[in-house]
Image (cartoon, rainbow, N blue to C red):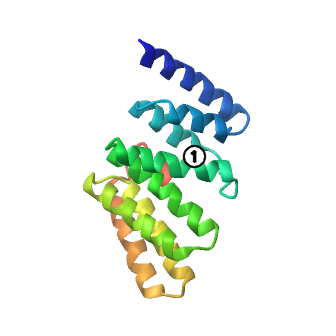
Amino acid sequence: MRSYLFFIFLFGFSQHLLAESINYDSLLIVAQSTDDRDVFRSIEETIRSEENEYSLPAAIELIVYCSSRTKVLNYEFLHGEFKFQESTIHVYHGNIGAGMKMAQEALTIFSKYHTLEAARSYKTMGSMTAGLGDYKTALEYLKKADLICERFKDAPRYAYMR
C-alpha cells in the first residue's frame, strides 16, 4: 500500500514537473528514498521527455545517482537508459571518449533485449564518431541504427526514435 501511494505521489509530482520544469533536487530525494522500479522508470521518462539541462549540477547528480542505483538494484534495462543519459552529459561537456564508452555500455544492454533503444545508441555513437572525423565508422553505426529501425517501423515508439 505504501508503495502504491508513493507511486501515485510520484505520478502527480511528475505531471506537475512536466507542466513547469524539472526539479532535479526533488527527484533525487525521491530516487534516494525508494527501490521501486516504476519510480525509477518514471524518473527516466521525465528526464527524457524534457529539454534537459545537462550543465546543471543537480541534473547530472540525479542521472549519475539513478544510473548507479539501478545497477545495484539489478534493473538492467533502466540502468542502460540512465547510462545513455550519462553518455549525453559527457558529450555535452566535450568528453567524447567517456560519452562513447557509456553509449557502448548502454548499447550492450539494449542489444540483449532487442529494443529500439539500441538504434538510439548506434545513432548517437555515429554522430560522436563523425564529429571525431571517422566517417567510415560513423556510417557503419548509422547503417546499424537504420536496420534496427526498419524492424521496428510499425512500433508505437518508432515515431519517437526518428
Q: How many labels does the image show?
A: 1
Percent of width and height locating residue 19: 70, 32
Q: Which residue is drawn at 45% across and 60% down?
A: 120
Percent of width and height locating residue 72: 36, 45
Give the side of residue 86 with respect to residue 57, left or right: left
Label 1: few (<14), some (14–19) or many (≥20) C-alpha neighbours in 10 Å:
many
Q: Which residue is drawn at 46% across and 30% down?
A: 34
Q: In which quarter of the image is residue 54?
A: bottom right
Percent of width and height locating residue 21: 71, 39
In the displayed structure, would residue 64 be above or below residue 105?
above
Would residue 51 be visible to someone looking at this image?
A: no
Q: Nearer the viewer, residue 151 or 139?
A: 139
| Residue at the far top in the pictured view | 1
Q: Which amino acid does label 1 sit on?
A: Leu
Q: In which quarter of the image is residue 104?
A: bottom left
Residue under label 1:
62
Question: Which quarter of the figure is the N terminus placed in?
Answer: top left
Percent of width and height locating residue 159: 49, 49
In the displayed structure, would residue 70 be above or below residue 153?
above
Would residue 127 be visible to someone looking at this image?
A: yes
| Residue at the far left in the pictured view | 112
Q: Residue at x 51, y 36 (%)?
A: 31
In the displayed structure, would residue 23 be above or below residue 110?
above
Q: Identify the element where label 1 is drawn.
A: helix
Q: Which residue is drawn at 52% across and 73% down?
A: 127
| Residue at the far right in the pictured view | 20
